Amino acid sequence: MASVDVLVEGYARDDGEASRVAGTVSLIRAPGLLAIVDPGMVADRELILAPLRAMGIAPETVTDVVLSHHHPDHTVNIALFANARIHDTWAVYLGDLWTDRPAEGVVLAEGVTLWSTPGHTPQDITTIVETDEGVVALTHLWWHAQMDGDPRATDLDALHANRARVLEVARFVVPGHGPAFGVDASTPR
């Protein structure tokens, strides 16, 4: 079975003088797969690297990086994982090789699948992971557990439709800028 570990719990807040933002950074482990989801902005890169070291994972052994979308707060630290295939909504990249393919339905490993889930941006994808505890969705359809809408959404109708799709299968959500949460009747649709 696959597993998910949150390496950095993201946030988005205003400290009075400037905005502070960190994307949630996660690790997925499955047979043949060590994937980082959204290696974006964090206060210090050691917040990503130290937990990996504690798990015995060197950055060069990460096989894949998944980008939920192309905003810098979710992408800025891609280069930490120089040997990884990079997945986004329309292609997979490795070295100088760019291979076009839609993300919808791409299986990275048994129990780890990419879904196209536009809403926040037209290029959003969600990573669906089947774990022993239930299905985990790593997604930017929610910034955090109480996020009804999305002030930066490019298509609120698509966002809500894709939330409904994800909630049909997910037991847990790892959102773009907050702690993971369990899905229940109060989860914003």
Image (cartoon, rainbow, N blue to C red):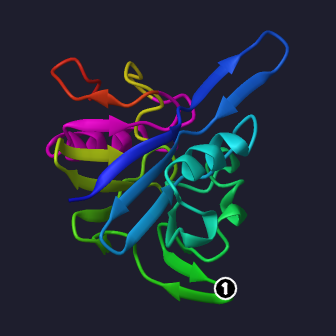
Residue under the point 45% across and 52% down: 27
Residue under the point 22% across and 70% down: 110
Q: Is residue 15 left or right of residue 172?
A: right
Residue 123 visible, this angle: no
Q: Which residues are magenta?
A: 150-178
Q: Is residue 113 magenta?
A: no
Q: Residue furthest top?
A: 16
Observer-nearest of 33 and 72 = 33
Counting from the top left corner in percent of width and height, residue 129 is at 27, 55
Counting from the top left corner in percent of width and height, residue 115 is at 32, 61
Dividing the image into 4 quarters, which one contains the C terminus? top left
Q: For residue 140, which quarter of the picture? A: top left
Residue under the point 55% across and 71% down: 61
Inspect the image, locate mark 1, and give the three-letter code of the amino acid beneath it.
Gly
Q: For residue 175, which quarter of the picture? A: top left
Residue 134 visible, this angle: yes
Query: Which residue is labeled 1 in the image?
Result: 95
